[in-house]
Amino acid sequence: MTTPLVFSTSTYDYLGNAIAAHGGWERGTVVRKNFPDGEHYLRIESDPADRDVILIGGTVDEAATLELYDLACGLVTDGASRMRMVIPFYGYSTMERSVRPGEVVTAKTRARLLSSIPMASRGTQVFMLDLHVASIAHYFEGETRTIHVYGKSLVTAAARMLGGHDFVLACTDAGRAKWVESLANDLSVEPAFVYKRRVDGSSTEVTGVSAQVAGRRVVIYDDMIRTGGSLLGAAQAYKEAGAISIDAIATHGLFPGDSLARIRASGLLGRIVVTDSHPRAVALADDFLHVDSTAKLLTEHLISNR
């Protein structure tokens, strides 16, 4: 049996290379260029006919989503016998449900778009890492099989690196309390979360913390850091409650604009650890922002779901 052929979208070439190396698999190549009017050109150079194809690409923006869609369609049309799409970051999880009449559930419409990719003869699988809302996996339609990959092993290893063996594992709000409690039990440490009160329709304020953190090291976990507003609010609460040091872990680090610089400038956090699920985090990695690779974890799931 031939080895899998690994392709990636342009923003995820770094992860495509790493997964191919971990699996000992062949790397597929794609030619890309733009026409003067902005139209995109793609040509698949490595023949996928009768091959098990792995395609890595996150939906970090609309252009990346459409490149993922176009490449997947092209690979199946060119004869890929099986398609395994790896989406390390699913970028529409904020709108996973409607709250007000008329709101479009973008997480569902994008899943429907990706579900319309032609089915490979031996099936199509979609691997997604630490979804913001687990139900998103059920938005995919037809015969597409979704596999939710949990990054718990990466999170617990990062927590030990930051906190050692005596720390409090905390979260930014009660919404993540169950998940943080589960992680804390695995690590044999105490969990904590902050209490919030809604001030108006768009903002909240922290009113307290759930555990004794005075004189303790605190490691905050959240699945995603975007601008860092919730993270800084929680960190301030833990500091005021007496924490002697505060670090943070997230699976997905987005950091738009100057948000990482603002988080650093706050002086509240010693270090942040995220994964390479988002290319923005990879580009910003430094002594303050440590980026762990997801390649080994994703490769293991690709092998176990053959």
Image: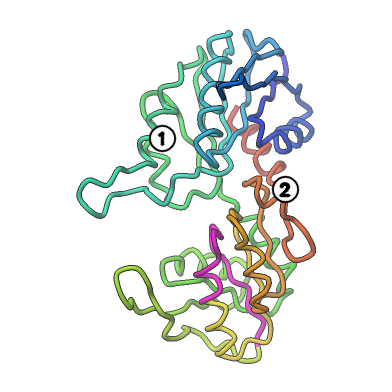
Residue nearest the observer in this picture, 235 or 266: 266
Query: Gap between marks 2 and 1, in whole Å?
Result: 26 Å
Amino acid type, label 2:
Ser
CB atoms of marks 2 and 1 within 8 Å: no
Q: Is residue 237 left or right of residue 133?
A: right
Q: Which mark is residue 263?
A: none
Q: Which mark is residue 110?
A: 1
Q: Which part of the image, by quadrant, shows the C terminus?
A: top right
- Residue 227, given in percent of the width and then of the height, sits at 54, 62
Q: Which part of the image, by quadrant, shows the N terminus?
A: top right
Q: Residue at x 57, y 66 (%)?
A: 221
Q: Which residues are magenta?
A: 216-233
- Circle 2 — which element? loop
Look at the picture and state if 76 lies above or below 88: above
Q: Is residue 97 within the magenta segment?
A: no
- Circle 1 — which element? helix
The residue singled out by tag 2 in the image is: 293
Residue nearest the observer in this picture, 195 or 51: 195
Q: Residues within 10 Å of mark 1 (few under 14, many from 20)?
A: many
